[in-house]
Image: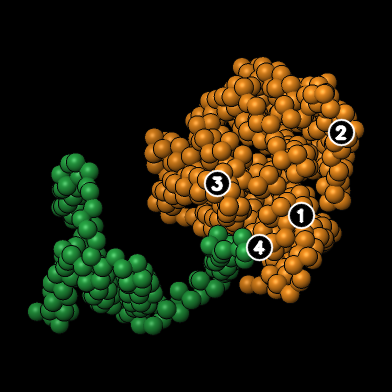
Chain colours: A green, B orange
Amino acid sequence: MSIDLILFLILAVVAVATALGMLLSKNAVYSALFLVLNFAAIAVFYLLLGAPFIAISQVTVYAGAIMVLFLFVIMLLGAETLAPSKVLRGQGWAAFGLAVVLVAETVYLLVSRHAAVGVIARPDAFLNTMDSLREIGKALFIQYLLPFEVTSILLLVAMVGAIVLTRREKGG
Amino acid sequence: MYTPTMLLAILPEILLLTLGVILLVVEPFWKAENRRNAGWLTFGGLLAALLISLLFARPADPQTVFGGMLRYDWYGFFFKMMFLFAAAATSLFMMDHEKLGRRGESYLLLLATTLGMCLMASSADLVMLYLAIETTSIPLYVLSGFMLDDKASTEAGFKYLLYGAVTSAILLYGFSLLFGFTGTTNLDTLGNALAAGPNMSGLVFGVILLLLVGLGFKISAVPFHFWAPDVYQGAPTPVAGFLSTASKAAGFAVLLRLFFAAFPGFASWPSILAVVATLTMTIGNLLALPQTNLKRLLAYSSIAHAGYALIGVVAFSELGRASVVFYLLAYIATNLLAFGAVMAFSRITGSDDIKDFSGLSRRSPWLGLAMLAAFLSLAGMPPFGGFVAKVIVFAAAVDKGLYVLAIIGILNSIIAVYYYLNVLKFVYLYRMDGENEEAHPIPLTRPYAIALVVLAVGVVLLGTLFGPWFDWSNLAALNLF
């Protein structure tokens, strides 16, 4: 057994366990923390697959920025333990049915297309170095320069809009 | 990689952004009573941007810049000039609005949404296009809900946001499927790849429907029009005017370029659009008939006008494209004039019910004249721009043998004449009950006077000296892709 496979098996257990923990814990803070752990485990999967850029952005963007924001919101609202909200009648069964359909679809595709696609080949050594990062940077700042800059305008405007809509006028 | 053309291609956008940043930095230092000057600054800046772009940034042969993200051509340029003009007029209308006029943020949001529209008109890539659409929409959501203490405005903003978010998600799904089928996001290669690939007309038909949902929302075509009346009525009137003109024109700009570039070989979409155009004209006009609120009436009329313009798209020819561009030009000038006149009136009287317009021609003859020009042009009467625009659109339909569609369009314009003239009946024939109208004048402030005069002259010019305007529309339509 190669070291990669051992790592993969350990991480797979961690990932599934934390995902279940997120779903099953009653306390919203625990759920959020389980999700952080889940993101971290998946980030290591990406590293194993030779995608360091995605791994790092998974950690910084998802586990770092978004989940910390989530935790703040949960704690500020004091929503750690919400009373069980009303669910629609039959919602559980519908969700179960849809999940079964999804799993069946995935299994069918894996089995039927396996011969045609085969196991996706390991990425070559080039991708596993930081060179891929350089390529992403080049694409982002040469080909996609304009969309990149427009995103920054979009964010600025969204920020101004949020302030406009939430600010209370003085004396008004 | 870098060429000076790249900067010329986005010169209007650069100027808009510069103006926005200046506004954002300077405005907080002004005293509260001078804040209204932000409107003059915006107006002046937009005019300067318009002139500088016209002088220096005229495109030569069409080319793609920024790695295929934008197309630098007459089509995009012509639309950009329209958006800058509409934004300049809107900034004048905003100045004397009770809530918008003294807030620098409202002008900044106007500039940002104009920037997004400019990018929409010239995008040649799905990634760029989607970002441009969002840059257009998000400031408009905020502007619609700008009057926080007004329930109707908040509702308008929220409703617009919800509809916008859902339709933009559907549009994005369509984009993702297109990328999945062809492996490219570039509009030029996309059309070829779709045509060369295996026959997937069923799937492509589905994609066309998805795209139609997203763009149909932008141009408020039936059956994606439900948001329009509530939003136009609730939003601040200058914003409603801008929504119904520039935002709609931007939607058409994308619709034309996307459908002509990506699906030239699929004969199914003109027939879908023909159905949409018929429904849009008919339902818009029929629902406009019983309206008693002028802003709601203008909302339904603007739905109907989207239908007329769609006829030109259905014609699927060069004349058809030119007719759409010209129609939008005339429609922008006319509808801004209509909304501006309504606003100048309701700012003093606090009402936009049609019956309160009684005796307007005596209370303010010039405002009455502006309403006359706007509504006759909307109705499609010579010598105003709306007449020529309608003639060219119907001509494009007849030219391609779409007689039924042209006849439906003409019947609809006859229905529409009724409710437009009905408004003018109140303005010119009815008197205020037992009052002396001279005692209730409607003073126009300077920004309104400037904007209304320029727009009224524009509407007349478009209807009389239409030759050069049509030549420019034609030039724009030639270079579509």
Secondary element at tag 2: helix
Disc assigned to residue B363:
2
Q: Chain of mark 3?
A: B
* Residue B387 in view in this figure: no
Q: Disc 3 versus disc 2: distance between alpha carbons?
A: 31 Å
B113 up-or-down from B298: above or below: below
For label 1, the residue is: B95
Q: Chain of mark 2?
A: B
Q: Disc 1 versus disc 2: distance between alpha carbons?
A: 23 Å
Camera-side residue: B318 or B314?
A: B314
Q: Earlier in the sequence, mark 3 or mark 1?
A: 1
For label 3, the residue is: B151
Tell me residue A165's x, y (percent): 55, 59
* Residue A162 placement, left or right of B461: left
Res B230 quadrant in image: top right
Q: Earlier in the sequence, mark 4 or mark 2?
A: 4
Which tag is nearer the camera, tag 3 or tag 1? 3
Residue type marked 4:
Glu
For label 4, the residue is: B105
Res B332 quadrant in image: top right
Secondary element at tag 3: helix
Residue type marked 1:
Met
How many neighbours does mark 1 have within 10 angstroms: few (below 14), some (14-19), or many (20 or more)?
Answer: many
* Residue B86 in view in this figure: yes
Camera-side residue: A64 or B371?
A: B371
Secondary element at tag 4: helix
Q: Disc 3 versus disc 1: distance between alpha carbons?
A: 22 Å
